[in-house]
Amino acid sequence: MNRARPKQIVIRASEEEFKKIKIKVQKSKLKQNEHILKCLLDKDIYVIEGLNELTAELKRIGNNLNQLTKSVHEGKANCSKELSEINEEMKEVWQSLRLLIQKQL
């Protein structure tokens, strides 16, 4: 037993994942344990809650843009009002994204 590190963590990997890990370990010239610990402990992971809602909103805006583009190409749309609405929606989305990021940091 390693007295400096008495705790053990076991992970499962597919054959492909295992091969990729082995290649990265070899390239790092570190022992496997050292490489994995360095990867896990030296990198920050950010979890941003609310991304699903933000993604849905972006899809709606994208749909609006597609409809507007189609209408413009068909000569059916005076797009100043629609573009104004989309611009406002984009501002709201960016504000939401900034708030989500600030909450997580």
Image (cartoon, rainbow, N blue to C red):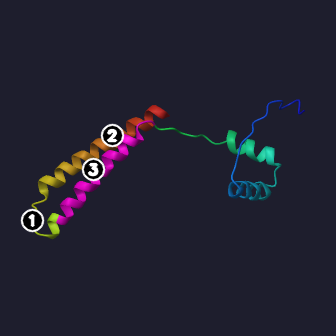
- Say what amino acid the circle numbered 3 marks: Arg
Taking the spot 68% from the left edge, 41% from the top edge, the residue there is: 40
Check whether the beta carbons of the residues at disc 3 and disc 1 lie within 8 A of each other: no
Q: Residue at x 39, y 39 (%)?
A: 98
Label located before the other in sequence (3 or 1): 3
Residue toward you, 56 or 27: 56
> Extreme bottom residue here?
74
Please report the residue visible at 88 percent of the width from the left and 33 percent of the height from the top.
Answer: 2
Return the residue at label 2: 95
**Left or right of 71 on screen, residue 25:** right
Task: Give yes or no for residue 73 being in the magenta stretch.
Answer: no
The residues bearing labels 3 and 1 have C-alpha atoms spaced at a distance of 21 Å
Marker disc for residue 53: none
Give coordinates of residue 68: x percent, y percent. 18, 60
In this rendered view, identify the residue nearer to me: 42 or 75. Answer: 75
Which mark's residue is nearer the viewer, 2 or 1? 1
Q: Quadrant of residue 75?
A: bottom left
Measured from the top left, where is residue 52 in percent x and y?
Answer: 40, 42
Q: Which residues are magenta?
A: 49-70
Going by the numbered disc 1, the residue's amino acid type is Lys
Name which of mark 2 and mark 1 comes first in the sequence.
1
From mark 3 to mark 2, how far is it between C-alphas?
16 Å
Identified at 89% across, 29% down, the residue is 3
Counting residues from the start of the chain, the first of labels 3 and 2 encountered is: 3
Q: CA distance from mark 2 to mark 1?
A: 32 Å
Q: Is residue 56 left or right of residue 87?
A: right
Please give the residue where the numbered disc 3 appears in the rendered image.
Answer: 60
Crowdedness near tag 3: few (<14), some (14–19) or many (≥20) residues, C-alpha within 10 Å: few
Crowding around mark 1 (Cα neighbors within 10 Å: few <14, some 14 to 19, many 20+) is few
Please, what secondary structure does the residue beneath circle 2 have?
helix
> Looking at the rendering, which quadrant does residue 70 occupy?
bottom left
Label 1: which secondary element: loop
